[in-house]
Amino acid sequence: MLDHSQVRGRLRQRPPMLLLDTVREFSPPDSLVATKAITGGEDCYRDMADGTGIDGFAYPSVLLLESFGQAVSLLWSLAGLSPPDEVPLMVGIRDLAYAAPAVPGDVLEHHVRLSHHSGAVGEFTGETRTADRTVLTVGSILVVSRPAASLLPTAPAPLQEKDGR
């Protein structure tokens, strides 16, 4: 449904933190299946010693969760769950379980489902699978949206002298 250039156009992340390749399925507004191919050339494997067995190449759990979170963000965006000038922010996770490692050569399929949506708040659930196993299950991810402009860094206030100048 969405190729890589379209995915990139919908997410704020850029390489090396853009961790999705395509969207294969989208059933508005309830579900989405997004993919991410793991390759041995990714930054997280840069310092691996020669001769390291495949078990040493388990994809980092934090990157697996970030990739799933980007799929949640895509569902949020595609379903139009907030105005276009707002950004979804993950604020909580419940019942997260890493079931099996993913390694280079695996294609992750993030199956994301919207459980509940009300105003600026959404709750999502799902799992990440490869061709032959489940690697992650997510009981609940809570998301809130905020105006993008409110997330920009602000300059610190200038220091004042003791006499008020």
Image: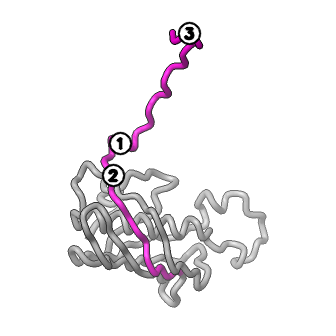
Quote the CA–CA distance across marks 1 and 3: 32 Å
Badge 1 vs badge 2, beta-carbon distance below 8 Å: yes
The residue singled out by tag 1 in the image is: 150
Q: Which residue, as the protein is rendered here, is positioned at the far front?
A: 163
Quote the CA–CA distance across marks 2 and 3: 38 Å
The residue singled out by tag 2 in the image is: 146
Three-letter amino acid code at the position of disc 1: Ser
Q: Dot 1, how many residues are within 10 Å of its Cα: few (below 14), some (14-19), or many (20+)?
A: few
Which SS class for mark 3?
loop
Q: Dot 3, how many residues are within 10 Å of its Cα: few (below 14), some (14-19), or many (20+)?
A: few
- Pair 2/3: label in front: 3
Please provide percent x and percent y for residue 57.
67, 72
Residue 137 on the magenta span: yes
Please provide percent x and percent y for residue 128.
47, 80
Give whichever of 60, 125 is nearer the camera.
Answer: 125
Q: Quadrant of residue 56?
A: bottom right
Q: Residue at x 51, y 90 (%)?
A: 132
Q: Residue at x 53, y 70 (%)?
A: 64
Please provide percent x and percent y for residue 152.
40, 39
Three-letter amino acid code at the position of disc 2: Arg
Magenta region, residue range: 136-165
